[in-house]
Each structure stands twice: as C-alpha cells, then as structure tokens.
Image (spheres, rainbow, N blue to C red):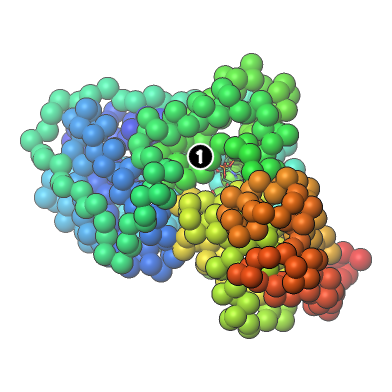
Amino acid sequence: MRQLIWLRSDLRSADNSALHAAMAAGPTLAVYLLSPEQWREHDDAPCKVDFWLRNLAELQQQLARLNVPLLVRSAPHWRDAPAVLLELCRQQQIGAVHFNDEYGLNEQARDRAVSQTLANADIACHGHLDQLLFRPGSLLTKSGGYFQVFSQFRKLCYQRLHSALPPMLGTPGAQAPLPVASDPLPSAVPGFEPPPRSLSELWPAGEDAASARLADFVDERMGWYQQRRDLPGVDGTSQVSAYLAAGVLSPRQCLHAALRNNYGEFESGNPGAVTWINELLWREFYKHILVGYPRVSRHRAFRLETEALPWRQVPDELAAWQQGRTGIPLVDAAMRQLLATGWMHNRLRMVVAMYLTKNLLIDWREGERWFMRHLIDGDLAANNGGWQWSASTGTDAAPYFRIFNPISQSQKFDPDGRFIRRWLPELAHLDDRDIHNPAALGGLFGAANYPQPIVDLSASRARALQAFKSLPKLEAEHV
Ligand SMILES: Cc1cc2nc3c(=O)[nH]c(=O)nc-3n(C[C@H](O)[C@H](O)[C@H](O)COP(=O)(O)OP(=O)(O)OC[C@H]3O[C@@H](n4cnc5c(N)ncnc54)[C@H](O)[C@@H]3O)c2cc1C
C-alpha cells in the first residue's frame, strides 16, 4: 500500500523518523504544503521561508536518489490542509500518511483535523517523535505535571539518557522507482521576498552543509564552547539553530556528534561538550513547556500575574530598538546583526530583550514578534521561552530584580569592542573603553550620526523595578 510522508519542519532524508517508517511500510511519496497565509499569521520571517524553499530543493535531490517523488501542494491556511491532503491521497491511492510531530497549538489542531478527515476516508495517519529527544508527557514531575524548573527537567533527561540513548536512523535505502514525477519547486512565495544574497549565503542549504557545520563545530570549537559561548565577537557557538528549526539537522544527530567527541559522556568530560548538550536540553525544555502550558502558544504570559504590568506604548522607542538606534552600542549592534544576518548571538538576544522589556518597559510580545519576523531560526518555543525568560514573565525566568546593565554586559562580553565595531562602523574609531558608552564623552566623540541614549539606564531600571514590585503576587514570591 502506498505511503505518504508529509514534510514540515523535518527537511532531511537522514535520521528522519517519519520517512523511515513510511519507507519501511511501502512505496512512498513525499509532499510539502505551501501555506503563506498561515506563515504570515505566525510571523514567519521571509529569510526563514527562503531557507525552507532552498532546503526543500536540496531535499528533492536527496529524495530522488531514494526514488521518492516530492510533490508540492498549496494549502494557503492550515485549515485547508485536510481537504488538500485528502484529495492528494485519493489521486495517488495513498493508504497511510506519516508525519513528524510538531508541538504548537495550531500545529496540533491542524494534525488532529487532518487525521480525522483521513480516518473518515479509511486512510491511517501516523505521527512520529523526531523533533525532540523525548516525547512531551514522557518526562513529568513526581506529581505528574510538566517541569517548570530546567535543572529538575535536565536531571530526568540525564537519567533517561543513561538508560537509553535515542538511536539515530541513518538514510533509508532506495525504493523501486514509482511512476510519479516530482513537482517543480517555487524559488519564492509571494509575500515573502527572498533576502539579499549577503544574508542567504551565510546559511547554505542542504543536509551536507548542515552536517559540515555541525562537524566543524564539534571537532574544532566545541572544546572551547564554555569559555567562548558568551562572546559575540568570537565564533564560539555552533550556529546550527536554523538547521535544527527547519529540521535539516535532528537533535539526535547533534547529540550523537557531541557524544562522539566526548567519549560518550553527556554529564561529565569536556565542559564544552557538557555545556553544549545542556543547550540542546534547553531547546527540549521549551518545547515540553509549549505542550504542558498551551497558553504560551497563545502568547500569554506563563506567569499570568505579570499580564498586569503597565507596559508602555511608545512607538518611537520601539522603532529605535528595532532599527538599532537606541544609543546603547551593544544593543544597536545586536539589532543590526539581526537585520543583516537573520540571526543574533544568544547573549545579545538576552541583552536586547532585557533592554526592551525592562529599560523601555515595552511588552515582550512586541519583541517576540519582531524576532519572529526577522530570525532565520525563529521557533515559537525557543523564542517565546527566551522572551519570557528575559521579561521575567516565564517559567524558570530571570528574577525581575536582576536586570542586565547593557553597558556592563558590553564591557564584559565584548571587552575590545570587536563586535560593536563590526556592526557600528560609525563608532569604530573609539577606543576600547569609550566604545561601550560614547554618551559619557558628551558631544565630543565625533560620531554625529550616532544617537544619544533614548532612556537613562538607571532611571529606567528603577521604573521597571517599581512596576514589577507593584505586582502583589510577584512581591510575595520574591521578597
Ligand atoms: C529572547 C530570545 C529569543 C530566542 N529565540 C530563539 C528562536 O527563535 N529560535 C531558536 O532556535 N533559539 C532561540 N533562542 C535561543 C538561542 O539564542 C539560540 O538558539 C542560539 O543563539 C542559536 O545559536 P547557536 O545555534 O549558535 O546556538 P548554540 O549555543 O550552539 O546551541 C546549540 C543549540 O541549542 C539550542 N539552544 C541554545 N540555546 C537555547 C535556548 N536558550 N533556548 C532554546 N534552545 C537553545 C539551539 O537549537 C542551538 O542551535 C532565543 C533566546 C532568547 C534569549
């Protein structure tokens, strides 16, 4: 009986659970749905959509080697998916559909609707665990709830990894050719303009490019990860997030690559490897949170009491933050890195998010949306988790009174100003001390086109503390 793999955020042929299961069950076709209306609703960035399409083109070639034709259908909104897939299944005499599970509320609702429609037509639907190491719901507290504290979640992950490592699946063998031709792939989708080449060239498509990036990191740089991961001027992190988010790499491939370079240890051995695996577990944690606490999928605060915060409506300040014109060099350099590359260093994501939500007291949802609209690795769970962590509205979040000072962060993590000089050439002539805080030079720093700080850091910090302190429940918890 013919099988269909419905590709979504799993754009690879190696170690793909649904592809394996489909090909083991019978002759397999693949389909990808173009859903621009839904993508717009989800604020998916044009550079991310372009990355999907480029990876799809590479995947089509990989699948051709396996004799799996890749079809493309239009389902502008996910509510169209059941009818579009049913029609395809009928045309191609499909007996069963396989997909890898996705965990947002809309994704789950879409998959339930598709499964129901196909079941009514006697077509089976099989969801597979692939995007995560552990199925949500399989790691729970003693009282049966989802973990809210990362260290406790990680402890249980370690126990599970000690008893059984999730195995990798490799690439399936080729099947006998089918009399079905692959569809031509679009190189762009209206409404999502492809980014400039200077951006897309930073993110070459395909499994080979992704594996090479992963191997380069684990072989050459993972050993230094613990020391260098917080330095944005240094190439200290893996930069595989876009590949993980699109599923060009699996978390199992990442975990196994790290273990190969650490004698199979995940809890001990090289501190770089242990710290990096820890980050993979943060990724895991936030996706489990998404399932356990669906309100975060609806952009609600995890700590509901923080929804009473008096967020400021200040479009000028929001625009200055978005365009990198706040007058705080590290914040501005980071925001310009985002616009130019579709990516931002993790330390800087925290710095700019704290600055927006604390110093400007602007709702974290504004920042979350801006990030999604520009990140090539934009991922609901990680983005929401990171924003709510920084805004002190989330699970296991930064306590509200621990507000980063962006100038101290700059001095500490970009001590020689290398990162700032790269993104703010107008400040490149300043010395290593002044570059972090040109406003301290008064009008004398000779960069007429660089703005004065839009807010005073200490007064705005005090304003944020006051706002949080006024939340009765938070005060009771923290003081
Ligand atoms: C405000 C904010 C927004 C964020 N938005 C996203 C997002 O949309 N998509 C995204 O993938 N990550 C997001 N992150 C997490 C993190 O910043 C990126 O995963 C990381 O910078 C990607 O670079 P890398 O691949 O070099 O990471 P590495 O340091 O090499 O880490 C390896 C992998 O672990 C995962 N990871 C690392 N840190 C985190 C984290 N804090 N939370 C969840 N997963 C993590 C990523 O998949 C990453 O590729 C956000 C963090 C913050 C503070």
Task: Pick whichever, 360 or 181, lies toward us.
Answer: 360
Q: Is residue 296 visible?
A: no
User: Residue 112 vs residue 142: left or right?
Assistant: left
Report which residue position mark 1 lands on: 240
User: Where 126 sits versus 24, above or below?
Assistant: below
Q: Position of residue 37 (x, y in %)?
A: 32, 68
Amino acid type of the residue that numbered disc 1 sits on in the rendered structure? Val
User: Where 155 sits versus 463, above or below?
Assistant: above
Q: Circle 1 sits in a helix, a strand or a loop, which is it? A: loop
User: Where 366 sits versus 434, above or below?
Assistant: below
On-image quarter of the N terminus: top left
User: Residue 44 vs residue 6: left or right?
Assistant: right
Residue drawn at the location 40% of the way across and 53% of the way down: 48
Q: Position of residue 195 (x, y in %)?
A: 37, 56
Q: Is mark 1 within 8 Å of ligand 1?
A: yes
Q: Position of residue 92 (x, y in %)?
A: 13, 45
Residue drawn at the location 27% of the way across and 32% of the way down: 62
